[in-house]
Image (spheres, grey):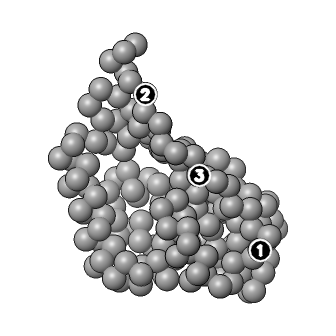
Amino acid sequence: MPGGSGDNIIAVKKQAEEMGYAMMKKDYKTYIKFMHPKVIAHMGGEQGVLDTMKSVEAHMAKYGMKLAYINLDEPTPIIDTAGELQCTISSNADITVKGGVIHANSVFICISKDKGLHWVYIDISSDYEWVRNEMKTLSSKLVIPVPQKPSFEDVEAK
């Protein structure tokens, strides 16, 4: 069981890696276990999340896109506030497409309500305003890195 802040940092990253691995394997039921309940509700419940994930998967397949790689940065310092532990973690992903690779960056807010045993994540890269409006318990001290815009690497030009 996580105890100190070092254990919590390890748990944040380990569980984020499990979430990323589930995404790469298209194991959406496991992926959902790492999503914040408010995000799941916002997307129409578990079925809404599954439908969205399958729609994104079909769109990617249609255009020959494939998630090839995910790497996580180190989490920001953990804040103990409002009965929750909170931090952020950035991820970098490579998506292969015809002729190249898209390098994408995401930022996740990480929250634990059980002293670091289980973490849930909120991707703030796409709907930052919704997160700020809905997540009233977020600490004002939470370090939220600005996500970078995706970049394209043309592999055919090399």
The image quarter in which residue 134 lies: bottom right
Amino acid on which disc 2 is placed: Glu
Q: Is residue 17 left or right of residue 42?
A: right
Amino acid on which disc 1 is placed: Ser
The reply to whether residue 3 is visible in this rendering is: no
Residue at the disc numbered 2: 153
Please report contact status of discs 3 and 1: CB closer than 8 Å, yes or no. Answer: no
Q: Residues within 10 Å of mark 1 (few under 14, many from 20)?
A: few
Q: Secondary structure at mark 2?
A: strand
Q: Is residue 146 left or right of residue 22?
A: right
Q: Earlier in the sequence, mark 3 or mark 1?
A: 1
The image shows residue 148 at horizontal and vertical percentages of 57, 46
Separation of disc 3 and disc 1 at Cα?
A: 18 Å
The image shows residue 108 at horizontal and vertical percentages of 58, 62
Residue positioned 20% across, 55% down in the render: 58
Please report contact status of discs 2 and 3: CB closer than 8 Å, yes or no. Answer: no
Screen quadrant of the C terminus: top left
Separation of disc 1 and disc 2 at Cα?
A: 36 Å
Q: Secondary structure at mark 1?
A: loop
Give the residue furthest to the front. 129
| Camera-side residue of 10 and 140 | 140
The image shows residue 30 at horizontal and vertical percentages of 40, 67
Residue at the disc numbered 1: 140
Give the residue furthest to the top. 158
Residue at the disc numbered 3: 147
Q: Secondary structure at mark 3?
A: loop
| Camera-side residue of 138 and 71 | 138
Q: Is residue 50 left or right of residue 5?
A: left
Q: Residues within 10 Å of mark 3 (few under 14, many from 20)?
A: some
The reply to whether residue 135 is visible in this rendering is: yes
